[in-house]
Image (cartoon, helix red, strand yellow):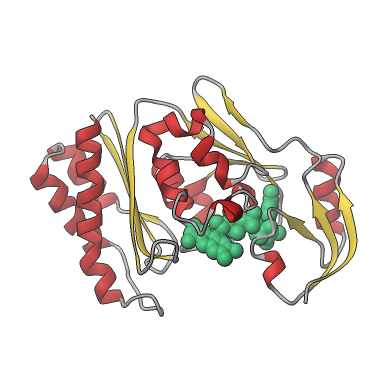
Amino acid sequence: MLQIDNYLYASSLTEAYNTLQSVPGSVVLGGCGYIRLGARSISTAIDLSNLDLNFVRDTGSAIEVGAMTTLRSFETNPTMTRLANGVLKSAVENIVGVQLRNCVTIGGTVAGRYPFSDPLTALLALDTELQFVNHGRVSLEEYLSGKGYKDILEKIIIPQDDRSAAFTSIRKSKTDYAVLNVAVAKNADNYRIVVGSRPGKAMLSTDAADYLTQNGLDDKSAAEAGRLAAEQLQFGDNPRGSGEYRKAVCPVLITRALTEVMHAA
Ligand SMILES: Cc1cc2nc3c(=O)[nH]c(=O)nc-3n(C[C@H](O)[C@H](O)[C@H](O)COP(=O)(O)OP(=O)(O)OC[C@H]3O[C@@H](n4cnc5c(N)ncnc54)[C@H](O)[C@@H]3O)c2cc1C
């Protein structure tokens, strides 16, 4: 059972951050999708819901999304669904059901750094940056490659440019965790090819991206990029699939996603 000794509605990000640093056993609450599943004791639960962090803002050059924004906003907010061919909508719409997506937040998703995460794969393809209270602005790529911070995520910043993007995944059933997920993005002649749920966390394939930059995108190069990504990245076993299966299916998903981007262009 989950036990919470003290409950703090933080009145500022500074108060939330100082409490997290100074009170042993304190925990920041997002939508509590995972926090409430565990049997644990929390000395002080830090609730951010009074801090106006539930927003989607178009700044012209970027879309900023507050940490307490739910994943449901990724599929219903027109600013989000317009961005990069609606890739973020595609990345969240298979996550369990509307009720869960109405609760779980982008803050908890990023801070959790879940290797199976669908939105993290898409956000990495979109070159997303993160704004933390203490660590300031860091790229999602850098954040995922490190060990995480004892900090509070304020918002994410997604560049708004001419990028076309696509997300695809393979799942044993529609709402199960992905066996493998893929997002690709094309901006002028630059590509980002991301594979997640390997079952390790989402990673970029630089070999596939460089190949596409040099050779352009067509049916043949899409298939070759998929092959290069499967060669470059590591795949492993978990109860959802073997590393061998993931490696075999990776080029197929990348080719599908690149074909979607080609047709969008
Ligand atoms: C049953 C179930 C099935 C799921 N299936 C999928 C799936 O198929 N695909 C997928 O991509 N995802 C899936 N998810 C994950 C979900 O999409 C969210 O990523 C997850 O629930 C975390 O979001 P949350 O708001 O619930 O975070 P919480 O559970 O509240 O918090 C998660 C962690 O983040 C920390 N945290 C929260 N907010 C902040 C912040 N602003 N700053 C710093 N730290 C913070 C918390 O302290 C905690 O450590 C599933 C979740 C559940 C419960």
**Nearer to me, 231 or 105:** 105
Which quadrant of the render holds ligand 1? Answer: bottom right
* Quarter that holds the N terminus: bottom right
What residue appears at the point 12 percent right and 40 percent down from the top-left corner? 218
Q: Is residue 148 shown to the viewer in this render?
A: no
Query: Which residue occupies 25% across, 32% down?
Result: 264
| Residue 88 against residue 7 in the figure, above or below | above
Residue 178: percent from left, percent from top: 40, 64
In the displayed structure image, the side of residue 47 where residue 83 appears, left or right: left
Q: Residue at 44% across / 65% down in the picture?
A: 177
User: For residue 181, which quarter of the picture?
Assistant: bottom left
Q: Position of residue 30 (x, y in %)?
A: 69, 53
Report the number of discs.
0
Pick the front one: 259 or 192: 259
Query: Is 203 displayed left or right of 103 in the figure?
Result: left
**Residue occupying the far right of the picture:** 6
The residue shown at (79%, 38%) is 51
Q: Nearer the viewer, residue 23 or 251?
A: 251
Give the left or right position of residue 209, taking residue 135 as reference: left
Give percent across and percent down for residue 159: 47, 31
The x, y position of residue 217, in whole percent, is 16, 38
In this rendering, is residue 253 above or below 73? Answer: below
Taking 241 as reference, is 252 above or below it?
above
Residue projecting furthest to the top: 60
- Quarter of the image for the C terminus: give it: top left
The answer to whether residue 128 of the structure is visible from this angle is yes
- Quarter occupied by residue 229: bottom left
| Residue furthest left in the image | 220
